[in-house]
Amino acid sequence: QINNVSAMLVLARPVTGPREYVLDLEMVTMNSLMSYRASSVLRLTVFVGAYTF
């Protein structure tokens, strides 16, 4: 998490291709003062080519 409204996804190890990766990311929003909780889901598809550039 970078701040209250953004985050960063970091690649922890190299990936090789050709391959397709599908990531499901969930963000949970909470406000304890208003007893409010919501969640959002993002599906991120990453296409990795066979060649480096």
Image (cartoon, grey):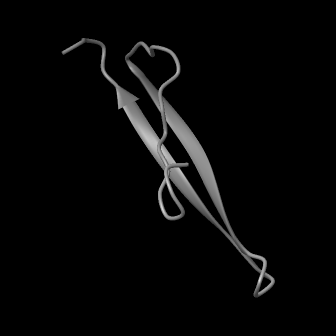
* Picture quarter with the C terminus: top left
Q: Is residue 9 left or right of residue 47?
A: right
* Residue 45 at x, y percent in the picture: 45, 42
Q: Is residue 7 above or below residue 9?
A: below
Q: Is residue 1 left or right of residue 28?
A: left
Q: Is residue 35 left or right of 39 when viewed as pictured?
A: right
User: Foreground residue, 34 or 24?
Assistant: 34
**Placement of 24 over or under 22, stated as above or below:** below
Residue at 25% across, 11% down: 51
On the image, which quarter does residue 23 sit in?
top right
Q: Position of residue 7 (x, y in %)?
A: 50, 50
Label count reads 0
User: Residue at position x 30%, y 13% from top?
Assistant: 50
- Judged from this view, the residue extending furthest toward the bottom is 34
Residue 26, image quadrant: bottom right
For the point 24% across and 12% down, which residue is it?
Answer: 52
Q: Taking 9 as reference, is 18 above or below it?
A: above
Q: Position of residue 14 (x, y in %)?
A: 45, 14
Q: Residue at x 54, y 63 (%)?
A: 4
Looking at the image, which is closer to me, 52 or 50? Answer: 52
